Amino acid sequence: MTKKQKAKLMNAVMAILALFFFLVLLIPQFSVSATSPAWWIETHSFFANLGSNFKDNWMLYVFVLVLIYGAIKYSKKK
């Protein structure tokens, strides 16, 4: 693997991790009502349960910011 390929792979991995943790933080912020579709209730429940372990944990926010910074840094590397 060349350095450019490694950088692209690392960028993809960091972007996926950042998106996942962003969803863990974002989705539980939305509400669920009795008229919500089943897929939304299941998605919300999954991320809310997962995110409850990280509630009020500032390290998770720092980790997400570091992942986003790393993804941007590696994407600009040529």
Image (cartoon, grey):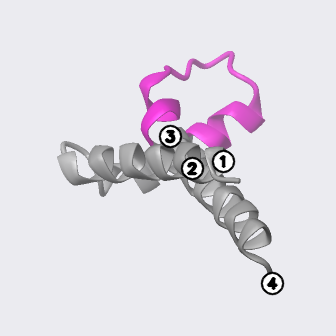
Q: Quadrant of the N terminus?
A: bottom right
Please say if the residues under marks 3 and 4 sit with CB atoms less than 8 Å apart.
no
Whether pointer 2 and pointer 1 mark residues with C-beta atoms closer than 8 Å, the reply is yes
Instruction: Give the labeled residue for mark 4.
Output: 1
Which residue is disc 3 drawn over? 22
Residue 60 in the image: x percent, y percent?
Answer: 30, 51
Q: Which residue is found at the position 30% from the left and 57% from the top?
A: 53
Q: Circles 1 and 4: CB distance less than 8 Å? A: no
Going by the image, does 38 lie left or right of 43?
Answer: right
Spatial separation of the CA atoms under disc 4 and disc 2: 19 Å
Q: Residue at x 79, y 78 (%)?
A: 2
Q: Secondary structure at mark 3?
A: helix
Expressed as whole percent of the image width and height from the top left, the position of residue 64 reads 41, 47
**First along the sequence among labels 3 and 4:** 4
- Which sits in the foreground, 5 or 44? 5
Rounded to the nearest angstrom, the CA distance separating label 1 from label 4 is 17 Å
Q: CA distance from mark 3 to mark 4?
A: 30 Å
Judge whether 69 appears above or below 14 on screen.
above
Please state which amino acid type lies under the numbered disc 3: Phe
Of labels 1 and 4, earlier in sequence is: 4
Q: Which residues are magenta?
A: 25-44
Q: Position of residue 27 (x, y in %)?
A: 53, 32
How many C-alpha atoms fall within 10 Å of the one at disc 3: few (<14), some, or many (≥20)? some
Examine the image and state in which quarter residue 38 appears.
top right
